[in-house]
Amino acid sequence: MSSNKRARTRAIRAEMATSGESYSRAAHAATTRAARHLRAVCFTCRKDIADGNGVIHIRHAEVARVEKEQAEATERRVEKATAEGRTGFAADVLTLSEFLDRPQDARWQVHCFACNPHRDDDCEGCYAIRVERCRTWAQLVEWTVHLSEKEWVGAATNWMEFIRAVALGGSPVGLLCDPADRIAGV
């Protein structure tokens, strides 16, 4: 069922609840809005990206760098805990300085093809999603489910932060939703 059809069904049921009318009568009175698409806005030029003209991407080399730094930080923490005689749960607890010294996650970006910093190699070495494949909330949820199955996405990238910015409207670039669709009061 398409998102427009689901929205119409919800509007009809809401009309039935307020008016007490039957489904067919409420269907004539119910109003719905068309589903609004997500906009892709380039991180560099800050212009809207048309379908077929941009990507949401992350560099595999950047992810590998973050994973390496995380492994090194874990090794240092284990060595320090062992030297201090901490074991079990106490060995796993991060100190404030260890927490603050964590490597920054690799960042997902949105670029039009003209501004893509990896355009010389056609984004080879990137995990790239064409913007037209992420135009609706349903597509974004599907990509989130797909990416969540990849351990490196949750461990070394900012995908969840990227998605949160879409839902809350926390950034002027990237994927943007209509203000009426944003999560309020969070």
Image (cartoon, rainbow, N blue to C red):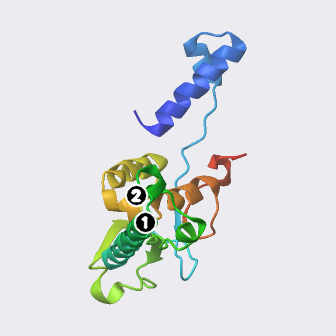
Give the SS element for disc 2: helix
Q: Name which quarter of the figure residue 82 lies in.
A: bottom left
Give x and y (percent) for residue 147.
35, 55
Amino acid at the residue labelled 2 = Gly
Q: Are marks 1 and 2 in contact (CB under 8 Å)?
A: yes
Residue at position x 47%, y 38% in the image = 3
Q: Residue 159's x, y, as percent?
A: 45, 61
- SS at badge 1: loop
The spot of residue 103 in percent (x, y) is 47, 73
Q: Is residue 63 left or right of residue 3?
A: left
Q: Nearer the viewer, residue 109 or 3?
A: 109
Q: Is residue 89 above or below residue 157?
A: above
Above or below residue 156? Residue 183 is above
Question: How far apart in space, not on screen, are marks 1 and 2 (Cα)?
Answer: 6 Å
Please tell me the numbered disc located at residue 154.
Answer: 2
Residue at image point 56% right, 14% down? 23
Quarter of the image for the N terminus: give it: top left
Residue at 47% x, 33% y: name it.
5
Residue at x-position 64% and y-position 31%: 31
Residue 69, numbered circle: none
For label 1, the residue is 157
At label 2, counting other C-alpha atoms closer than 10 Å, the crowd grade (few under 14, some 14-19, many 20 or more) is: some
